[in-house]
Amino acid sequence: MAAANKTVQTELLAITLVSAGTQQLSSVLTLTNTIQALIIIDFALVATTAITTGTEFRIEVSEKTSGSDTWRPLTAFVTGTTAAITATVQATQNSGSTSITSTGANSVAQDDIVFLKNGTLANSEWVKVTSITSTTVFVLQDATTNAQGGSAIYNKSQHFVATIDCLSIVRLRVTVNNKYQAGTMSDIVARIAAITTDTFS
């Protein structure tokens, strides 16, 4: 029986800090033999100041193999505007931790998606909160991948997923628009990945 060839692509955008009032393009995904692509977007607000508009993640497509004049928006996601809280992970928090202890009180809530901003940005990660043990401890759905001692804690993170029919698309990219509608913005962190399904074999 024929099976689809699924490929986990190199990240279209590795974990990247996108400053307020700027835009960031992902790398371009060429879709020569691709019939479907799953686009996975991770977002974190890494400032506690109030904002008036969210960040726009715009999935764009092109019918040509080259050139910059044929990019067109296919779909988009806009993040929330609620300001994030911040706290700090205790210094001894190791990889494989199933709960996070902060050095002071935090306002993380059950079901929050929390971003742990590591001093080495590439070692940062998004975690899901399943319960609150105390004012300084929250429990995670999955254990941490990296040691996060001393990392900054930000809530109000979001994940987005889109399945794209690629039969009529030649190229795809994602624009991170962190100056959407000229609103008051803050610094963010973004990561964008893709899984493609190619012609059956």
Image: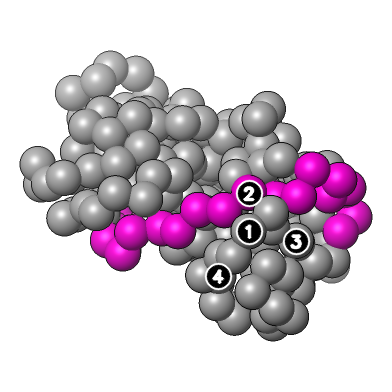
Q: Which residues are magenta?
A: 74-97
Say whether residue 161 is magenta. Answer: no
Q: Residue 36, how many percent across, how many down?
A: 53, 55
Q: Which residue is mark 3?
A: 101
In the picture, the disc for residue 88 is 2
- Looking at the image, can residue 131 be seen? yes
Q: Contact, CB < 8 Å: mark 1 with mark 2?
A: yes
Would residue 186 be found to the left or right of residue 165 on screen? left
Furthest-top residue in view?
67
Which tag is nearer the camera, tag 4 or tag 1?
Answer: 1
In the picture, the disc for residue 108 is 4
Of callouts 4 and 2, which one flags the residue occurring earlier in the amino acid sequence? 2
Towards the viewer: 199 or 84: 84
- Looking at the image, can residue 162 be seen? no
- Helix, strand, or loop for circle 4? loop
Q: Which residue is mark 1?
A: 104
Of callouts 3 and 2, which one flags the residue occurring earlier in the amino acid sequence? 2
- Helix, strand, or loop for circle 3? strand
Towards the viewer: 26 or 135: 135
* Residue at the image position 66 percent from the left and 37 percent from the top: 118
* Residue at the image position 36 percent from the left and 50 percent from the top: 48
Residue type at mark 2 is Thr
Say whether residue 78 is magenta. Answer: yes
Q: CA distance from mark 1 to mark 2?
A: 7 Å
Image quadrant where residue 61 sits: top left
Would residue 59 be found to the left or right of residue 106 on screen? left
Which tag is nearer the camera, tag 3 or tag 1?
Answer: 1
Q: CA distance from mark 4 to mark 1?
A: 12 Å
- Helix, strand, or loop for circle 1? loop
Say if 172 sits above or below 44 in the image.
above
Say if 120 sits above or below 3 in the image.
above
